[in-house]
């Protein structure tokens, strides 16, 4: 059993004096009473945070995170204020190179209802939300063809960990990829920049490479909005963006702060394939290979926490359901067309 928290949540570092606090939203039961519980989680600032400051959470409120690091046999290192803040030209260039030009999620349409459900009274500048909910990613500004729209890390896992779960509709499978993207993954594997990192009590919390085969590789875009970009298929003329796969070590800013190649997965760069206008829906030139049941789990998870539903996933669910019904109907009629009295059953040796 494992959990995947989307957005930037999985990449907040630990600090003994965090500047953001974790909380849950929506109508979720305790996992002790329901093993299939889902949570909508969020973070709020607990003090004024200056532009360029790193956001820090805590990996343990009671013990300051000691247990988390001890279980994984890691040394807790607390960066100095100077090490965890960017200023001047570095900040300007990183904002230009890495800040997303996309929006997805709650808008002013649903956020007040979400707060009312939980009885929350936290302050939120409503001008930072779009008027409507957008569970399919849209652009926040005009973007030129060839321009990078967003860059975000993707976890690399094996098919067995993702298939049949509620996260599958956001996942990218090996068979979904274009030949150049498959070649990129092969090169990353050869250079040591692609590993299927795994650690749990069975490995004594040591990181191991659980790579099985390229056909088993699944990419989970777990930060930013790439996972919510609508997939329209390889040959769909309405597509307006593509993915480029690069190693985490290629991110100069990441390396300058002690990062290593490939430990957190790979980087996904979302690139515009034509000029885009502000507010335009992003449409990725990859197929959605998730099944009807997997889409159903995804929609149920969002519904359970009171989040707006991605209409493109709901539409595909209806299409998949109709196709499944048509297939079952055809199978029944195929059997009805068989003349049992004259049917030739194969004998030993016949194929």
Image: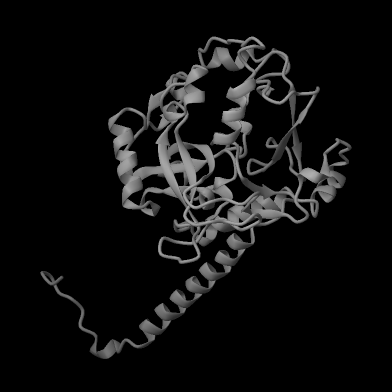
The residue positioned farthest toward the left in the image shown: 349
Residue 243: x percent and y percent? 45, 47
The quadrant in which the N terminus is found is: top right
Does residue 87 appear to the left or right of 283 in the view shown?
A: right
- The colouring scheme, among rainbow, by chain, secondary structure or one colour, is one colour
Displayed quadrant of residue 69 = top right
Q: Residue at x 43, y 38 (%)?
A: 157
- Check the image and report above or below for 155 versus 312: above
Q: Residue at x 69, y 13 (%)?
A: 16
- Check the image and report above or below for 193 versus 133: above
The residue positioned farthest toward the front in the image shown: 89
Residue 153: x percent and y percent? 50, 35
- Check the image and report above or below for 273 versus 20: below
Q: Nearer the viewer, residue 137 or 139?
A: 139
Does residue 53 appear to the left or right of 197 in the view shown?
A: right
Does residue 8 appear to the left or right of 109 in the view shown?
A: left
Residue 104: x percent and y percent? 66, 49
Residue 239: x percent and y percent? 49, 61
The quadrant in which the C terminus is found is: bottom left
Q: Nearer the viewer, residue 218 or 32?
A: 218
How many numbered discs sit on the rendered protein?
0
Does residue 305 appear to the left or right of 137 in the view shown?
A: right
Q: Is residue 158 visible?
A: no
Q: Residue at x 45, y 57 (%)?
A: 285
- Check the image and report above or below for 200 versus 229: above
Q: Is residue 266 visible?
A: yes
């Amino acid at each position: 059993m494992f959990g995947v928290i989307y957005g930037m949540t999985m990449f907040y570092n630990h600090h003994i004096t965090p500047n953001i606090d974790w909380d849950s939203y929506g109508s979720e039961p305790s996992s002790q009473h329901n093993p299939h519980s889902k949570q909508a989680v969020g973070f709020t600032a607990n003090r004024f945070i200056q532009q360029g400051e790193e956001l820090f959470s805590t990996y343990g409120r009671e013990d300051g995170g000691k247990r988390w690091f001890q279980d994984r046999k890691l040394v807790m290192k607390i960066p100095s204020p100077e090490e965890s803040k960017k200023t001047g030209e570095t900040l300007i260039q990183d904002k230009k190179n890495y800040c997303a030009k996309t929006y997805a999620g709650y808008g002013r349409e649903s956020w007040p209802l979400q707060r009312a459900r939980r009885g929350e009274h936290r302050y939120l500048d409503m001008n930072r939300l779009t008027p409507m909910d957008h569970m399919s990613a849209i652009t926040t500004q005009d973007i030129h063809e060839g321009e990078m729209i967003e860059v975000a890390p993707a976890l690399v896992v094996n098919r067995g960990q993702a298939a049949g779960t509620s996260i599958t509709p956001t996942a990218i499978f090996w068979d979904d990829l274009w030949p150049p993207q498959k070649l990129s993954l092969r090169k990353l594997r050869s250079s040591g920049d692609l590993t299927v990192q795994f650690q749990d009590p069975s490995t004594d919390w040591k990181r191991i490479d659980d790579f099985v085969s390229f056909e088993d590789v699944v990419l989970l875009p777990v930060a930013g909005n790439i996972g919510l970009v609508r997939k329209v298929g390889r040959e769909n003329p309405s597509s307006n963006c593509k993915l480029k796969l690069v190693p985490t070590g290629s991110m100069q800013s990441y390396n300058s702060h002690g990062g290593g190649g490939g430990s957190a997965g790979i980087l996904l760069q979302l690139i515009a394939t034509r000029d885009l206008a502000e507010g335009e829906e992003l449409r990725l030139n990859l197929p959605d290979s998730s099944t009807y049941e997997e889409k159903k789990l995804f929609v149920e998870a969002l519904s359970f926490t009171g989040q707006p539903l991605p209409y493109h996933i709901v539409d595909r669910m209806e299409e998949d359901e109709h196709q499944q019904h048509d297939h079952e109907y055809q199978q029944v009629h195929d059997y009805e067309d068989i003349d049992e009295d004259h049917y030739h059953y194969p004998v030993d040796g016949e194929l």
